[in-house]
Image (cartoon, rainbow, N blue to C red):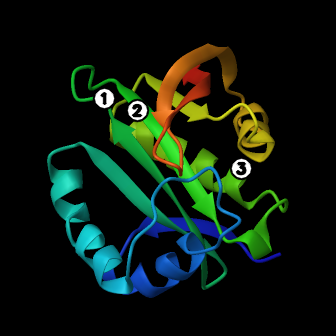
Amino acid sequence: MSKITIRYQKVSDAKRFYEILSNPNFIYFPAKPKSVEDEKKWLQDNPKRRKNNSEWNYTVLCGNQIVGTVGIKVNPRRKYIGEIGYFLDENFWGKGIMTKAVRLAEKEGFKKIGLTRIEILMQPKNKASEKVAIKCGYTKEGLLKKAIVGTDGKKKDALLYAKVL
């Protein structure tokens, strides 16, 4: 397999992200852009989000191919806590790519952003996401009731995994 790297997202990634996010098998990731233009609009604000330290979003590359994304949202009240989120093209599921990408993003979170705690939340049925958290050395801290929004717009329970410096 090609080398896994991450880089800041670019507006030119919009078409590929739209393709990935439009997959009907994405039942756990709530972001569903209505068009490539909507995705471009969202991506255009990434530099602003980095500048105000609210989000750090990266494109995941396998060799030169865009295969997904990983990002860190910084807690607005507790700037030392971040939450990692990610998605991956279905054709690349189960190959360890997201585990590598999360480790790369985590380094950025702890070293560059200055976080001391990083959390990963996922629906209890999302076993692949839970595997990523475990493989990356995150500790299961509990179940949060109605803590995240599902793809259906309803509040869902979430497993909380975390890693601290």
Across and down, in percent, residue 73 comes to 36, 41
Residue 28 horizontal/vertical position (percent): 62, 50
Q: Which residue is mark 1?
A: 75
Look at the numbered discs 2 and 3 and tell me whether their residues touch, using CB distance below 8 Å. no
Q: Residue at x 38, y 70 (%)?
A: 9
Horizontal and vertical percent position of residue 107? 51, 42
Report whether residue 87 is seen. yes
3D distance between C-alphas at marks 2 and 3: 17 Å
Instruction: Compare marks 3 and 1 and give the one earlier in the sequence.
Output: 1
Figure quadrant of residue 10: bottom left
SS label for mark 3: helix
Please give the name of the residue rendered at 80% of the width and 56% of the height, measured from the top-left corner: 96
Percent coordinates x, y for residue 104 in the rendering = 57, 51
**Residue visible at 56% across and 75% down in the picture:** 22
Cα separation between marks 3 and 1? 22 Å
| Residue found at the far top of this picture | 142
Residue at 48%, 78% in the rendered image: 18
Amino acid residing under circle 3: Thr
Q: Earlier in the sequence, mark 2 or mark 3?
A: 2
Q: Left or right: where does residue 135 sit relative to residue 54?
A: right
Mark 1 and mark 2 in contact (Cβ < 8 Å)?
A: yes
Gap in Å between the C-alphas at discs 2 and 1? 6 Å
Amino acid at the residue labelled 1: Asn
Where is 163 relative to 153, above or below?
above
Location of mark 2 (residue)? 82
Q: Pointer 3: what residue?
A: 99
Q: Quadrant of the N terminus?
A: bottom right
